Image (tube, grey):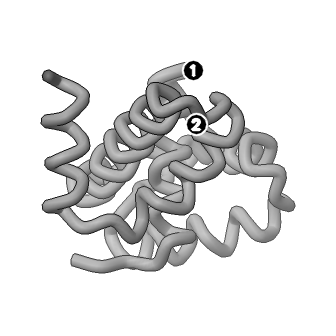
Amino acid sequence: MKILESAENYLERILMLQEKHGAVRSIDIAHALNFTKPSVSIAMKQLRENGYVTVDEGGHIALTQKGHAIAFRTYERHKVITELLVKLGVSPEAAHDDACRIEHDISDESFRCMQEFLNK
């Protein structure tokens, strides 16, 4: 299933914030991504309507099973690509930024080969 890169970024960030803080609200996402709260609210509405997140009465955001699968896949790719680039001599900052772009477009085959290379 292919979803928009921006949606993958939101889902990935929700997963990262959940791992770090537990509960996640729109304001946490806005601060983490340096977006306005209205922009995040619109995105959360779209993610909710598409079945990727739930939002409770207190405004706490949780990933659905479908949303978690996409977030986990994107985050895993980000970590592996960052690690590989750093091992190749790229600065951690540049590796992080590049991984953010690459993680969305890399083929499953290339990613699997990167993982295998790092595990050797």
Relative to 27, 98 lies left or right:
left
Residue at (33% x, 40% y) in the render: 76
Q: Is residue 2 above or below residue 13?
A: below
Relative to 37, 10 lies left or right:
left
Kind of residue sitting beneath label 2: Val
Contact, mark 2 vs mark 1 (Cβ under 8 Å): yes
Residue, disc 1: 21
Residue at (70% x, 34% y) in the render: 93
Coordinates of residue 20 in the picture (x, y in percent): 54, 20
Q: Nearer the viewer, residue 89 or 8?
A: 89
Can I make out residue 58 in this image?
no
Relative to 92, 101 lies left or right:
left
Q: Is residue 114 above or below residue 93?
A: below
Coordinates of residue 120 in the picture (x, y in percent): 14, 22
The disc placed on residue 24 is: 2
Cα separation, mark 2 vs mark 1, equals 7 Å
Kind of residue sitting beneath label 1: His
Residue at (80% x, 42% y) in the render: 31
How many numbered marks are there? 2
Q: Nearer the viewer, residue 94 or 33?
A: 94
Callout 2: SS: loop
Can I make out residue 86 in this image?
yes
Relative to 99, 50 lies left or right:
left
**Mark 1: few/some/many CA within 10 Å (<14, 14-19, 20+):** few
Coordinates of residue 51 in the picture (x, y in percent): 32, 69
The disc placed on residue 7 is: none
Specify the quadrant that holds the N terminus.
bottom left
Coordinates of residue 119 in the picture (x, y in percent): 17, 24
Callout 1: SS: helix
Image quadrant of residue 62?
A: top left
**Mark 2: few/some/many CA within 10 Å (<14, 14-19, 20+):** many
Residue at (42% x, 65% y) in the render: 104
